[in-house]
Amino acid sequence: MPYPSSRRGISRIDIIVAVALLCLVGQFVLPAIPRARELARAHQCRSNLRNLAVALNNYHDQFAVFPPAATWGSDGLDLKTLGAHEFPTPIHVSRQNWLQLLLPALNQSTLASRFDPAYPVADAANRDARLTSVSSLTCPSDPFNRRDNLYRMPLPDGTHVEFARGNYAINGGSEFVPADFGTLSNPGPTHSRYVYDEADRSFQFLGNGIAGINRSLSLRDCRNGLATLVAAEEIRAGLAPIDTRGVWALGQIGASITWGHGVIGDDGAPNATEKDASADDIRFGKELYSELGRDFIDGERMQACDHCDDNDQATARSKHEGGVHIVTLDGAVHFVSDNIEPTVWHIMHSRETPKELLEERFVEEIKGRDANFGRPAGLTAKQRLSGSLPQDLDNSVGMKFVRVPAGDFMMGLADKDLIYPFPSDVVPHRVNITRDFLMGRHEVTQSQYQQVMGVNPSWHVPSDETRAIIGTEKTDDWPVESVAWEDAVEFCRRLSQKPEEVAAGRTYRLPTEAEWEYTCRGGIREPILRPKWEDAIKTGETASNRIPSGTVLLPKPVGSYPPNPFGVYDMCGNVYEWTSDYRRQGYYSHSPTDDPTGPAIGYLHVIRGWYWVATGPNCKVYVSNEPWVGSRLIGFRVICEVAKTSRT
């Protein structure tokens, strides 16, 4: 019996409504499915990291040390030149790495037994094991970690061997691999350590992370807190078979080790993509760009050095939007923003960072930078009300000061012949120095530092270690160096408390970066033409970019070079100098015009030197350093404040 017409009409309406509802629901549900899948993948990535942290700590409980990042043999290597950054990374000598050693703790004892540590991992004896894909070492968010994208490692005989991919790396540290410092690109103290013994054919590479090459570390070696020190982090599988990044069984930088991702190199953040940066120094960088093209590599956010042939530097990378997962030594997994402040990224990878430095702000800092740096108003009211200043002044320990007149200038204006750019956030900006100030004519000397502090920490003193370089020459009038920023501040405090200085109403402080640059310019407003590199060699100025073989560059007694128009010496050479400012990316776009004093919050302090912007003939420089250690190329000068004694 047919339905009544009214029922047929209702049925059609129901169908139409149901279809409409399904379409409406689909608009919300279907887009949510990929998001849900990614959330599940990200959860697995975090779980894997957490398990790795547990395994690392279990290993430490058993052996009282963490596993080495990798063990390398020395067969066929020239150990003397291995650390000189002159030859491609000797990957054919790689043997065990940290992940192989952790396999038993990851319920992979059978796989662990298939590796023979007596042979390089590339040897035929280890073929089956190195080709095994391990789910607990795979982040499912990475589309390039797959069987048809195995890493093909070239061997010296022209053959290749293949490896399975992986997505986790141990923290080797924020220091750049070449074990040299005292150069423009790395004035120290941030440098990796390389030691070797030719007699027993042993060697070690050690950064400031939690593990080195041929070197294990323990919790006793970690000054940083367990909750703020990176243990391991995500990395991505290479984009092509020649791309060494993301190889779980290979103990190489980029493959299963991150290294050099701090303020010294150009991997200053996760997923480093700064324009024109040579991030991730890996083997066959040039060939990788030739094979895949820059647009593809940039689109994948997997930038690498396009002229490198060494596995020297690699940062954490992931396919997650906006950042990467890391795990700290306490087992906590965190998501770190790609927009993290570079100095924070630097110190959270250093076991030498003082524990208390990051404790309170760690969780907020890893969320990324914002534009609010406290925007300090500049010099304090007390400093603005300095008394009448003489043109020249000598203090009680023989330090000489000269009056620098107030004025304005363009801070951060590049030199005429600058080849490489400043860090991207260093933008030219007008600064107004609102009042005269007394700047030290010279750097603080070794003798002056000794008088105030009772010690001379300088490396450049006559000793058994330096006799072949400086002979027996007295160095009392050489600039003091190897002084931590904290010690330079303490010098100012103790000098201010000397009875003669108290009676004269004088106190001392480090110059702000703005005061330093303004003084160094000496009233010059236009871009400065720096001296040629060859001329710098002749004068013996320190802070060279690449020291030619056999050339020894030393500091000279203060005042050895001609003064600038303000009558101040050595700001374009001799040693780098500490300033009072923190370094924090983006500050220069928001800093006050009048008497800026630097960011209100920070961790590393600005150093300046070698010509007026600390830029050398061929190198971009990251002008900040850890304030708790010194370098043989970093000294300081001070400003004298005079108490207000009359109306001005």
Image: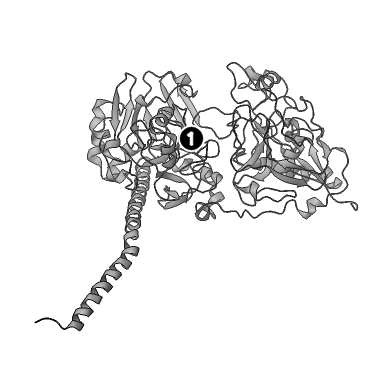
Front-lying residue, 478 or 441: 441
Secondary structure of the residue carrying tag 1 is loop
The answer to which image quadrant residue 580 occupies is top right
Q: Residue furthest left?
A: 1
Front-lying residue, 341 or 447: 341
* Percent x, y of residue 354: 55, 46
- Side of 249 relative to 213 (left or right): left
439 vs 204: above or below? below
Q: Which residue is mark 1?
A: 207
- Residue 118 appearing in the image: no
* Percent x, y of residue 509: 74, 44
**Residue lying at 37% horizontally and 47% vertically, measured from the top left:** 53
491 vs 80: above or below? below
| Crowd rating for badge 1 (residues with CA inside 10 Å; few <14, some 14–19, many 20+) | many
**Residue lying at 79% horizontally and 26% vertically, measured from the top left:** 562
Callout 1, which amino acid? Gly
Q: Quadrant of the N terminus?
A: bottom left
Q: Residue furthest front?
A: 5
- Side of 166 relative to 414 (left or right): left
